[in-house]
Amino acid sequence: MTNIKNDSQSHHKTEKLRLASHVASLPKSGIRDFFELVRQMEEVISLGVGEPDFITPWTIRENAIYSLERGDTSYTSNLGLLSLRRAICRYVAENYSVRYEPETECIVTVGVSEALDLAIRAITNPGDEIIYHEPCYVSYAPEITMAFGVPVPVSTKAENAFAIDPADLEKAVTPKTKAILLNFPCNPTGAVLNMEQLKAVADIAVKHDLIVLADMIYAELSYDEEIMPAISSLPGMKERTIFLHGFSKAFAMTGFRIGYACGPADIIDTMMKIHQYTMLCAPITAQRAAEEALKSGGPDMEVMRREYMIRRNVIVRNFNEAGLPCLMPHGAFYAFPDIRPTGLSSMEFATLLLREKHVAVVPGTAFGKCGEGYVRACYATSMEGICEALKRIKAFVADLKK
Ligand code: PMP
């Protein structure tokens, strides 16, 4: 027999909200329309997408293939293969001077994206405030909102080389502040923090009893003498820091989707619960590839880093020559030139440059309001492409002056 609801029941049903309002009300990424335009155009040189142009080094791909040939096609432990967690903890200890226990203080995730999401969800109670610095990676504020937290941006400025100003940071702290989210080397500015600046952030975290989420995804792509230090290596910080990292950028492994988090056992265990009920585990083939990356990927990573450094020098010099002041980024693979001398807004600059010269850059406002006046140009693309793009940008800026 069909179960027909009476009128009052069906009326009641239509009043229910179909979508989760905290998600439905999230703004769409400001650059969607812009990249729709990029897709429709032919022969665009793109300095837009933040992804290495290198193919994953062969030994890493080969090991993934071997693992499939061996028939490695099962689930792994929820936390990830123990052998991979051991390798990760060894790597982190050697490179960042922090020791984590592979059994309890490390979890393998689907990209650092998942690690970030798990970390935020594991520590956020509704209404907790999480401070982050802008301009920043596009997903931070939405992820905090989706975890029922409150995103609190702190602007960084070119005058401070886009480092976080401790005074501004401390001003943003309230009794509801739960954590500070850091991303240095920074997407989109390429900024890093030196030891003194890291210590200033650590002091604030200790003083106000805050957790620090450190998105270290670009750490190996540092162009100074040493790679970006980890805040968790500072005294009193290991117990309050979640170290988030992955293989996407330095090993050119974006499509493998492997990341990880190292941190205090209670937090990792809570992150594991979410991961276990939602993702189960990261794909085994990608975990095997990641093991190989840590074993033999170092020299290839160094070749890519050096190539990015050469491209960085070229791109920065040319932006400055074009009359668009550009700081020398210390890490990641983005230049963040100041386009205010053109009198255009970030969006106008990017749209006109695309229409007239077929070069795609990302408007700075995609990374937060304080990105107005800047654009992001990714130099993880061929030197040939970069040189041609810069030639066109110079012509574009010269045309604007006429
Ligand atoms: N954090 C930052 C700062 C990023 O730029 C990106 C990728 N663009 C991610 C996280 C996501 O990386 P993954 O591929 O490891 O998920």
Image (spheres, rainbow, N blue to C red):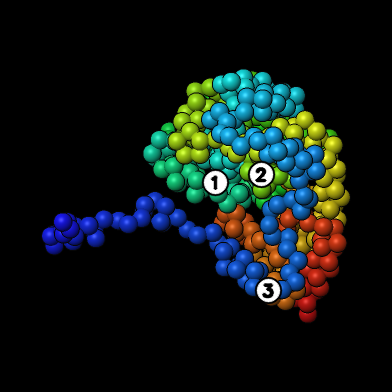
Relative to 285, 172 lies left or right: left
Give SS at disc 1: helix
Relative to 311, 358 lies left or right: left
Kindly report the distance in space between the C-alpha atoms of the residues bearing marks 2 and 3: 29 Å
Q: Earlier in the sequence, mark 2 or mark 3?
A: 3
Q: Of the residues shown, which amino acid type is indicated by label 2?
A: Phe
Say few, some or many: other residues with alpha carbon within 10 Å of mark 2 (under 14 / 14 to 19 / 20 or more). many
Residue 118: horizontal and vertical position, in percent? 51, 37
Please identify the quarter of the rendering in which residue 368 is found.
bottom right
Say few, some or many: other residues with alpha carbon within 10 Å of mark 1 (under 14 / 14 to 19 / 20 or more). many
Residue 207: horizontal and vertical position, in percent? 53, 25
The residue drawn where x is 85% and y is 37% is 299
Give yes or no for contact between labels 1 and 3 (Cβ–Cβ under 8 Å): no
Residue 389: horizontal and vertical position, in percent? 80, 66
Q: Of the residues shown, which amino acid type is indicated by label 1?
A: Tyr
In the rendering, which numbered label is found on residue 41?
3
Foreground: disc 2 or disc 1: 2
Say few, some or many: other residues with alpha carbon within 10 Å of mark 3 (under 14 / 14 to 19 / 20 or more). few
Kindly report the distance in space between the C-alpha atoms of the residues bearing marks 1 and 3: 30 Å
Kindly report the distance in space between the C-alpha atoms of the residues bearing marks 2 and 1: 22 Å
Q: Nearer the viewer, residue 18 or 242?
A: 18
The residue where tag 2 is placed is: 256
Q: Of the residues shown, which amino acid type is indicated by label 3?
A: Met
The residue where tag 1 is placed is: 140
In the rendering, which numbered label is found on residue 198?
none
The residue drawn where x is 61% and y is 41% is 111
Give SS at disc 3: loop
The residue drawn where x is 71% and y is 73% is 42
Work out which quarter of the rendered image holds the N terminus and state it.
bottom left
Relative to 85, 337 lies left or right: right
Position above or below: 98 against 212: above
